[in-house]
Image (cartoon, rainbow, N blue to C red):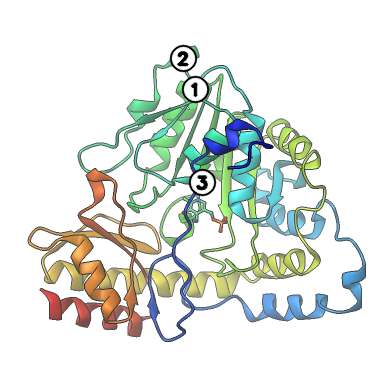
Amino acid sequence: MSKFWSPIVSRLTPYTPGEQPKIANLVKLNTNENPYGPSPRAVEAIRREIGDSLRLYPNPDAEPLKIAIAKRHELQGITTREVFVGNGSDEVLAHAFQALLKHGAPILFPDITYSFYPTYAGLYEVDYKATPLADDFTIRADDYLGHGEAIGGIIFPNPNAPTGCLMPLAGIERILQGNPGRVVIVDEAYIDFGGETAIPLVARYPNLLVVQTLSKSRSLAGLRVGFAVGHADLIDALERVKNSFNSYPLDRPAIAGATAAIEDEAYFLRTCQAVITSREKLVAQLSELGFEVLPSAANFVFARHAQHDAAKLAAGLRADGIIVRHFSHARINQFLRITIGTDVACQTLVDALKKQL
Ligand code: PMP
């Protein structure tokens, strides 16, 4: 590491993204992408934006997108003042951590969760405490209650990653009620595959920030668009951070494509339902093969086999041209995280597993 930069940089533990292999004919079930592709209306809107208009800076507030998101939640009292957008939900989350910059009290998140949280905490010098998951791998709402001033904020995905386990809205509300003095960030990257969003709670809880992405249920991982919904004061602070960083978070094609994707509700509902149906089929097949599959409300499943080592299974699948995700954390290193693909892709996976068992 160059001595010319801050010593903090050499102590960072950067996030390692899932593998994006170059070989086209691999069955890629490792990074929770949507198998169905984005709404044709989104693709068309992106195409229209690519041309002479790229000379011009984009709308600095990504206004059309904020309007589309607010409209979708207008019955819950959401206006554009309660919406923040960013370059992927990773950037939205980064801005939230920046807004907690050098916060005196540590923030709390599960010990098994999205591994970008400790990375951001390191980058923005936010202390944190990691709370173990329950024995059944769920996040226990009670673990986030009763800390008082000892904690400075809470963040967790719902459903959690990489387990796929969902916390019911009642649990989220208990956490919000028990923590009126600190921000509670609910990362809903996978909420559209069977979970219930906490956005309706925003009107009643000024400490709630709900973060969503267009990478999964809208199949736009390559476009990099995410957003947050929360009280106007929380959003205001994020805008302040954003404008101190990059006043144009989204480019013109991203604003156009994301807006069209949000507006195409019918395509969204149809493709989410297709993923859910494939997931339930895959869960049944894996269970029949002797896997224990955690209850998933996401577009992936987390499964282990009592008689077969997960790392070996993953290597065997890889040899057959199928990539799934395996984590080395001791408590979950016997699990495979498998993204829900098309029914054909899922069947290819099941057939390959059968050969190994
Ligand atoms: N949160 C969770 C829990 C995730 O798994 C992911 C995807 N890796 C993200 C946020 C970030 O998604 P994106 O930046 O593509 O919106």
Disc 1 secondary structure class: loop
Mark count: 3
What residue sits right under mark 1 in the picture?
A: 106
* Residue reaching furthest to the left: 307
Q: Residues within 10 Å of mark 1 (few under 14, many from 20)?
A: many
Q: What residue appears at the point 12 percent right and 71 percent down from the top-left corner?
A: 289
Q: Position of residue 356 (x, y in %)?
A: 13, 76
Q: Is mark 2 within 8 Å of ligand 1?
A: no
> In the image, what residue occupies the spot 80% across and 60% down?
64
> Crowding near pointer 3: few (<14 within 10 Å), some, many (20+)?
some
Whole-number angstrom distance, CA of label 2 to CA of label 1: 7 Å
Q: Is any atom of residue 203 visible in this view?
A: no
Which image quarter: residue 242? top right
Can you identify the residue that label 3 sits on? 14
Label 2 sits on residue: 150
Task: Mark 2 and mark 1 in contact? Answer it, CB < 8 Å.
Answer: yes
| Residue 305 x/y as whole percent | 14, 61
User: From the viewer's perspective, is the residue at label 2 or at label 1 nearer?
Assistant: 1
Q: Is residue 78 left or right of residue 327?
A: right
Looking at the image, residue 29 lies above or below residue 231: below
Residue 84 in percent (x, y) is at 70, 46
Residue 356 visible somewhere in the drawing: yes
Element at badge 2? Answer: helix
Q: Which quadrant does the N terminus fall into?
A: top right
